[in-house]
Image (tube, rainbow, N blue to C red):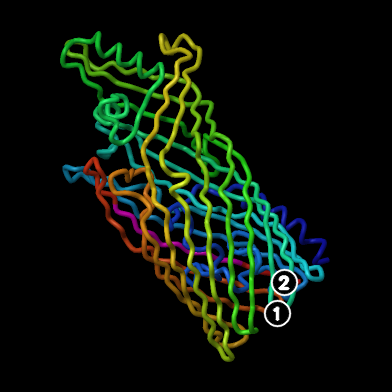
C-alpha cells in the first residue's frame, strides 16, 4: 500500500511545487540554501547526504542514500524587509513581505544507481511599492517586480565504488516575471538620448516618434514619467513566461569513511524569451497651456537574454566518531556572463488606439553589470540522540551588484547569514526537518542617489519518508 500511495503523493507534490511563487533570494538571486538540512548548515551541501535536495545541490550525494527510496516534501517561507529611500529622504517600504515556496523530491536506489525526480524553486527577486509612496512619482503608479525561476530535475547517480560516485541531471527550467516600473522623465531621457545613456539605453521606432513629438511641443514641455507594465495579478505565475533546459554534473570522493569531498558544476540555462502578450508602455507629457497628456500603448513585451548563471563548487564533509559532524562549501557563481543588462523589447499592437505608434518597437536595456560571486557556506551538526539532531552555520557572499546600477525593484545584495535548524525522527522511516535563516541588513546607494536596504528572515520545513 505504501508504494501505491506514493505516486499520488508525488503528483500532488509536483503540482504544488509547480505553482511556486516568485521569491526573494539572498545569494544574488540564488537561495542561501536548498533543503532545510543544508540550509541549517549555512547552505553547505556538496559532500554529504542531504536528501533529494541533492538534485539542486550536488547530485552525486544521492549515491550516499542507504534506503531503497525516499520522498521529501518541503515548504519554505521567505520574509524580506526592503525599503527604498529617495535622495530627499522619502521612504517607501516594500509591501511584499511573505513568499511561500514548496518543493518535492523522490529518489530510488537500484544496485549502484540512484535515480528520481525533483521540483525546486531556484531563486529570483521581488518587491512591491505602493503608488502613494514616492516611488509612484506623484501619479499613484504602483511599482512591482516578481521574478521566479524553477526546475523539474531528473538525476542519475552512479556509485562507482565505495570511494567514488558520479552523477548528472537533466533540468527542465521555467521562468516567470511581472514588472510594473515607473521611470521619471530624466531617467527615461537618459536611456533615449545617445549623448547620455549612463544607466541604460533605448531605441526603436517608438523612441524616434517620441523624440519627434517632443520637438513639436511648446518650450518648457516636460515628461512626467514612462511606465512599463506587464503583470497578471496571479500569485503563482508571472505575466511573462519562458522555458528551457540546463544540466549539472557532480562527483563525490570518500578517501576514508569519515571524510568526503564533493565537486559539482551547474551549467548555464538556455531559456526562451520571456513573453507577455498583454503589456503596456505609458508616457505622460506636461505641456504648458495644455496640461498633462497621457498616452498608453498596448502590445507585447519580450524579456530577452534572461538566463540563470553557471556555478562551480567544491565541498568537504567530516563526520568523526561521536555526535559531531561538519561541512563546508565554496562556490563561484558566474553572474557576469548573464547579468550585464536587463533587456526588454516592446512591440505596439497594430490597433487604432496606438495611433502613429502602431506596430512600432521599443528596445530598452537597463545596465546591470553584475560581477561573479564567491559564496562560503559552513556549518556543524550535533546528534543529541536517535530522535534529535541540531545544526547551525553561516553563509558569507560577495555582493555581485555594482552600487551604481542597483535598482530598488531588483534588490539582491545580502552578504551575511546565520542559520540554524533541527531534525526530529519519528521513526526509522519518517522525519521532520526545519531551518531558519537570518539575512543581515545591507544598505546601498545607487547612481540616482536612491538608497536601498534589504534584510530577510527565511524558514523551511520538510517531511521525509523512507522506504
- Tell me: residue 268, above or below residue 381: above
Q: In which quarter of the image is residue 13?
A: bottom right
Vertical relation: 272 (above or below) 39: above
Residue 207 appears at what percent x and percent y? 36, 19
Q: Which element carries disc 2, helix, strand or loop?
A: strand
Q: Give the range drawn in magenta.
A: 453-462
- Residue that badge 2 annotates: 466
Indicate whether residue 461 is drawn in magenta.
Answer: yes
- Quadrant where the image shows the N terminus: bottom right
Residue plotted at (44% across, 12% down):
353
Q: Is residue 110 above or below residue 169?
A: below
* Left-right relation of 447 to 158: left
**Which residue is identified by label 1?**
428
Q: Do the residues labelled 1 and 2 touch (CB within 8 Å)?
A: yes
- Image quarter of the C terminus: bottom right
Coordinates of residue 145 in the picture (x, y in percent): 42, 41
In percent of the image, x 57 and y 71: which residue is there?
A: 433
Counting residues from the start of the chain, the first of labels 1 and 2 encountered is 1
Q: What is the number of callouts on the image?
A: 2
- Name the one closer to the observer, 379 or 112: 112
Q: Which residue lies furthest to the bottom in this view?
A: 322
Residue at horizontal 69 percent and vertical 66 percent from the top: 166
Q: Residue 122's spot in the image, x, y percent?
A: 54, 53
Q: Nearer the viewer, residue 190 or 230?
A: 190
**Callout 2 crowding tier (Cα within 10 Å): few <14, some 14–19, many ≥20:** some
Whether residue 124 is situated above or below residue 43 in the rendered picture: above
Q: Where is residue 141 in the image (x, y as percent from the top left)?
A: 33, 32
**Rounded to the nearest whole Å, what is the CA distance between mark 1 and mark 2?**
8 Å
- Residue 257 shown left or right of residue 39 in the figure: right
Amino acid at each position: 500500500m505504501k508504494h501505491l500511495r506514493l505516486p499520488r503523493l508525488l503528483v500532488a507534490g509536483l503540482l504544488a511545487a509547480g505553482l511556486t511563487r516568485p521569491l526573494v533570494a539572498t545569494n544574488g538571486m540564488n537561495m542561501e540554501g536548498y533543503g532545510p538540512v543544508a540550509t541549517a548548515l549555512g547552505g553547505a551541501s556538496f559532500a554529504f547526504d542531504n536528501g533529494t535536495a541533492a538534485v539542486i545541490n550536488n547530485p552525486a550525494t544521492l549515491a550516499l542514500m542507504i534506503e531503497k527510496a525516499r520522498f521529501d516534501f518541503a515548504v519554505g517561507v521567505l520574509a524580506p524587509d526592503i525599503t527604498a529611500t529617495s535622495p530627499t529622504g522619502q521612504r517607501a517600504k516594500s509591501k511584499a513581505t511573505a513568499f511561500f515556496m514548496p518543493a518535492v523530491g523522490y529518489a530510488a536506489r537500484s544496485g549502484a544507481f540512484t535515480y528520481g525526480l525533483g521540483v525546486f524553486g531556484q531563486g529570483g527577486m521581488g518587491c512591491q511599492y505602493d503608488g502613494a509612496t514616492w516611488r509612484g512619482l506623484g501619479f499613484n503608479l504602483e511599482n512591482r517586480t516578481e521574478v521566479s525561476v524553477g526546475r523539474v530535475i531528473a538525476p542519475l547517480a552512479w556509485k562507482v565504488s565505495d570511494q567514488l560516485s558520479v552523477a548528472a541531471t537533466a533540468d527542465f527550467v521555467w521562468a516567470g516575471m511581472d514588472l510594473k516600473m515607473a521611470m521619471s522623465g530624466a531617467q527615461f531621457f537618459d536611456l533615449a538620448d545617445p549623448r547620455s545613456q549612463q544607466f541604460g539605453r533605448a531605441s526603436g521606432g517608438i523612441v524616434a516618434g517620441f523624440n519627434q513629438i517632443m520637438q513639436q511641443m511648446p518650450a518648457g514641455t516636460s515628461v512626467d514619467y514612462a511606465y512599463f507594465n506587464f503583470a497578471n495579478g496571479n500569485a503563482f505565475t508571472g505575466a511573462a513566461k519562458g522555458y528551457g533546459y540546463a544540466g549539472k554534473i557532480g562527483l563525490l570522493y570518500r578517501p576514508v569513511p569519515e571524510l568526503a569531498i564533493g565537486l559539482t558544476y551547474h551549467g548555464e540555462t538556455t531559456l526562451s524569451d520571456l513573453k507577455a502578450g498583454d503589456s503596456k508602455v505609458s508616457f505622460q507629457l506636461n505641456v504648458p497651456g495644455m496640461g498633462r497628456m497621457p498616452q498608453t500603448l498596448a502590445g507585447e513585451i519580450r524579456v530577452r537574454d534572461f538566463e540563470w548563471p553557471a556555478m562551480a563548487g567544491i565541498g568537504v564533509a567530516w563526520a568523526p566518531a561521536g555526535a559531531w559532524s561538519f561541512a563546508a562549501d565554496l562556490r563561484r557563481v558566474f553572474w557576469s556572463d548573464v547579468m550585464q543588462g536587463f533587456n526588454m523589447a516592446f512591440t505596439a499592437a497594430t490597433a487604432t488606439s496606438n495611433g502613429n505608434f502602431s506596430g512600432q518597437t521599443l528596445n530598452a536595456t537597463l545596465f546591470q553589470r553584475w560581477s561573479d560571486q564567491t559564496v562560503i557556506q559552513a556549518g556543524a551538526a550535533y546528534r543529541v540522540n536517535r530522535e534529535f539532531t541540531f545544526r547551525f552555520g553561516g553563509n558569507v557572499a560577495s555582493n555581485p551588484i555594482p552600487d551604481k546600477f542597483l535598482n530598488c525593484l531588483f534588490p539582491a545584495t545580502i552578504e551575511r547569514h546565520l542559520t540554524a535548524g533541527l531534525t526530529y525522527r519519528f521513526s526509522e522511516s519518517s522525519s521532520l526537518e526545519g531551518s531558519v535563516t537570518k539575512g543581515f541588513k545591507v544598505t546601498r546607494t545607487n547612481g540616482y542617489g536612491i538608497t536601498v536596504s534589504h534584510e530577510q528572515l527565511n524558514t523551511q520545513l520538510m517531511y521525509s519518508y523512507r522506504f
